[in-house]
Image (tube, rainbow, N blue to C red):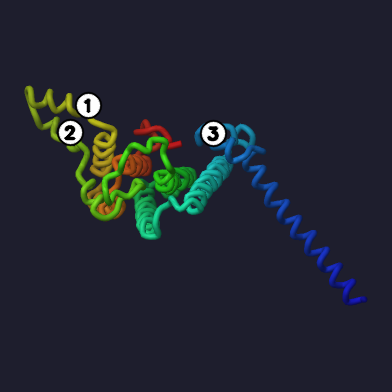
Amino acid sequence: MRIVAILLAFSATLAAQTHHVARTTASHASADQLGMTCSEILQTSSSDWVTKYMAAKGSEQAATIRALAAYGNCYDRRTDELAAKLARTGKGPSPGERANFQNVEKAIKAFTTKALAEAQTAADPVKAAYAGLYEKEFRYEFYEAYEPKPSPDIVKPAGEASSGVKTGAAAKSKAAPDSNEGAGGNAAEQTGPAAANAEATAKNAGPLTLAKNQFGALLGDLPDNQMHDLHESFGEILGPNSATPRMQLLVYQYAIFLLESPTDKPFSPPPF
């Protein structure tokens, strides 16, 4: 009976400690979410969420980083739920497509590390925290592309992967640049009607072409060795893994965000 009593007492103590730890963890998560659910948080933009969080927790740098972490946790949770839903219905990416995207993610992370270092913002924890948050968009975009769309009449070309990152023959067929690629690239060197036409073409360039031109301009501002290093690293993202124009645009906009100066006007608004 004495042994039984000791075991019961030990079990009760362990249960109480476990409940305390779980309650503390949940309380911490709730505090970082300001009592809001992830669904409620994600209904606001990340910028508005940071403003709301700092109004409640203070304007210190640490508060900004915690706000971004809370938003990122909710963003990851939504992506995880989507991935699990697709897996249950059998409509998600194949193992090969997931492995291919993991290579893309790895290349993005490698480029991020180099870009922040080259832009001399690696020591800025807030910039790094924003980069970590915005990087989450690629994984959600990957899975979201497999979500059934309300237009069943559209037939995908044979061999084309559903996600923004394509594989096989479809990747090769989509590897060509967009129709406006290179527009306005030599406008400064042209004169007369040719210059006017080039300028007009540049003004009518699509978002992807504008993003490519801006990325190239930022690279051009770097010393040659840094420029070549970053260009090579960036090539590992889109080079082996041809992507849809939308995925390309997201990647270029993210790369621009990493390289642009915090004192400059942002090339594009936050992704979410």
Q: Nearer the viewer, mark 1 or mark 3?
A: 3
Residues at badges 2 and 1 in contact (C-beta under 8 Å)?
A: yes
| Structural distance between the alpha carbons of marks 3 and 2 | 37 Å
Nearest the viewer among 183 and 218 is: 183
Q: Amino acid at mark 3?
A: Gln
The kind of secondary structure element at disc 3 is loop
- Most extreme residue toward the right is 1
In the image, residue 122 lies at what x, y percent? 42, 49
| Structural distance between the alpha carbons of marks 2 and 1 | 9 Å
In the image, residue 97 lies at what x, y percent? 36, 56
Q: Which residue is mark 1?
A: 204
| Residue 239 left/right relative to 147 | left
In the image, residue 106 lies at what x, y percent? 38, 57
Q: Which residue is mark 3?
A: 43
Mark 2 crowdedness (10 Å alpha carbons): few <14, some 14-19, many ≥20: many
| Structural distance between the alpha carbons of marks 1 and 3 | 33 Å
Residue depicted at x 23% and y 46%:
174
In the image, residue 189 lies at what x, y percent? 10, 32
Kindly tell me whether residue 198 is visible in this rendering. yes
Give the mark, 3 or 2, whose residue is nearer the N terminus.
3
Q: Which residue is mark 2?
A: 183
